[in-house]
Image: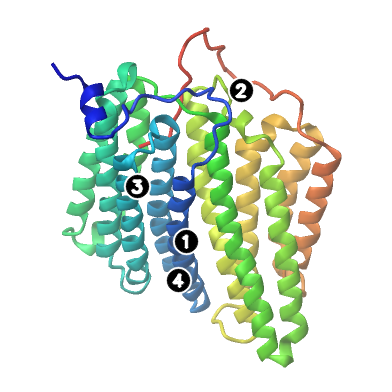
Amino acid sequence: MSTPETTAARSRLLPMRARDPHEPGRTASTLELFFDLVFVVAVSTAAVQLHHALTEGHVGGGLAAYGMVFFAIWWAWMNFTWFATSFDTDDWLYRVLTVVQMAGVLVLAAGIEPVFVDGDFTVVIAGYVVMRVAMIVQWLRASGTAGPTRGATRAYAAGIAVVQVCWLALLVLPEAVQGVAWVVLAAAELAVPVVAETRGRTPWHPHHITERYGLFTLILLGESLLASSNAIIEALHDEQDLGSLISVAVVTVVVTAALWWIYFWPPHHRALGEEARLSRSLRYGYVHYFVFAAAGAFSAGIEVEIDALTGHTALSDVGASFTVTIPIAVFVLGIWWIAIRDNADRVVNTVVPVGALLVLCDPVVPIPVTLTAVIMVAIVVVLVLHPPLSAPRPLRGARRREPGAPASRGGSS
């Protein structure tokens, strides 16, 4: 009589059992790094379209389209990341399904422009569903050998499947109600991990998962460095605004470096914790939507600032500056909330959020982004003088996990 193990051996597949959350030396695989490459395309496309929308003065519509598109990008990336930390086997079927998800990302990226221009979500939803169907197959495969987490794996598969049917149904709804339906379905996506994890906790590796988030942050910050390069290129073609454009390029590098410093200052694995509750891992995973979206929007804001200096935008100088400062403030406040505040002393917990709010005063300064750069450097100086606490502060109401109890996790659907 054949068993799942013997069947898998004949097909050159590995049993998809839950991985050890304390596995030593667990790092991102080359497949995960390869997977991230397609998101460079999607994020870049979304940032470019946001830049165009803001420059043309379509602020409300541009931000709404960006928020919707970026949700699809972020959620697809995060779902794969949390699944991989739990069940990565790196056999041929796992790799093929991952490549299918990558293809879905490219389809999604191709549909971003129609969302911004015509409000047409057809291609974006098609690419998104391709990614999610591949994820359903992964969860169903994991359910065969998941052991005590089988209930959770089946709940994930069922929940994702139901929501994907609803996404396809959204395409036939009247345009007037599609926005409301989108919000409802996004909430349903977010609810799947919350419900599934009550059926049996799936494990996660805190160092691995936070490394993955850090790598995606680097991708997003790289978009800002590209914007800085574009400022220099523009300056070489516009001698009239040479000084202002070069200053924007320099300040962008300074601010981007500061954002990198702030993000990686706290030990992120502590933000999750070896004994974290589901609520804590959900907070870390879900709040990163705003952190990631802000990082992507920052690069678009720099491009808008360049347009403002060269007279190619419908926005006022103050409005253009806000496209830079608001993403920075959101990014810093988000990281402070999920990773810094529980690992910092009173000085850091005062300077970081106050500094983020002061960044919003930058638009009243005659020289673009200069006050922001000064504030960001000041925050970094404080972080250097006040290293993270040797032990994180316990969350209010946190309970000690009993020996042998599985660690909770969230955000993997």
**Which image quadrant for residue 226?**
bottom right
At 86% from the left and 40% from the top, the residue drawn is: 385
| Label 2 Cα neighbours within 10 Å, binned few <14 / some 14-19 / many ≥20 | few
Q: Is residue 232 above or below residue 202?
A: below
Type of residue at label 3? Thr
Q: Is 145 placed left or right of 37 in the picture? A: left
| Circle 1 or circle 3, nearest the eye | 3
Cα distance, mark 3 to mark 2?
A: 36 Å
Type of residue at label 1? Val
Instruction: Decide which of tag 1 and tag 3 comes sooner along the chain.
Output: 1
Residue 193 in percent (x, y) is at: 36, 32
Q: Is residue 412 above or below residue 296?
A: above
Instruction: Decide which of tag 3 and tag 2 comes sooner along the chain.
Output: 3
Image quadrant holding the C terminus, namely top left
| Circle 4 or circle 1, nearest the eye | 1
Type of residue at label 2? Leu
Q: Which mark is residue 43?
A: 1
Residue 275 in percent (x, y) is at: 55, 19
Cα distance, mark 1 to mark 3?
A: 19 Å
* Count of numbered badges drawn on the protein: 4
Identify the residue under disc 2.
395
